Image (spheres, rainbow, N blue to C red):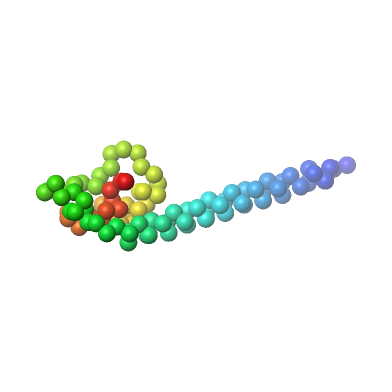
Amino acid sequence: MIDPLSRLRPVLAWAVLAVILAAGAAQSAATVKDAGAGLKSGTQTAEELFADAPYGVDPVVTGPVSASFKQKQQAAGCDSAVWPKIPTVCYPD
């Protein structure tokens, strides 16, 4: 005779997997939404932030950064930005 709990285990496993995937998708969507919000919040320009650097400051980050920071940089177009028109979101906090 088959135990009712043994029939329920695969269903529970799939349900848990579905919840985990849904949570991951929701977090990913929230991160992308936050990346766009960072573009509008910067009121200072890079030229104002780094007034003591007459030839500009390269927004290349050499240390470890979060995935959300990389997404913000990509959304802001930091790879193609030219001094002094570099969004402040290109620089780490």
Residue furthest right in the image: 1
Q: Nearer the viewer, residue 28 or 89?
A: 89
**Image coords of residue 20 (percent x, y):** 59, 49
Instruction: Kindly tell me whether residue 81 is visible in this rendering.
Output: no
**Is 71 drawn above or below residue 6 in the view shown?**
below
Occupied quadrant, residue 5: top right
* Location of residue 76 in the rendering, given as x and y in whole percent from the top left corner: 30, 57
Q: Is residue 3 left or right of residue 34?
A: right
Nearer to the camera, 82 or 91: 91
Q: Where's residue 22, x and y in %?
A: 57, 54
* Residue in the image at 84% along x and 42% along y: 3
Give the farthest residue toward the bottom: 40
Which residue in the rendered view is the most extreme toward the left? 54
Q: Quadrant of the N terminus?
A: top right
Judge whether residue 21 can be spotted in this image: yes
Residue 48 drawn at (x, y percent): 19, 54
Q: Is 2 placed above or below 74 here?
A: above
In the displayed structure, 62 sits above or below 55; it is above
Which residue is rendered at x = 43% and y = 59% of the image?
33
Q: Is residue 17 left or right of residue 12?
A: left
Specify the farthest residue to the top.
Answer: 63
Q: How many marks?
A: 0
Q: Is residue 92 left or right of residue 6?
A: left
| Residue at the image position 78 percent from the left and 43 percent from the top | 6
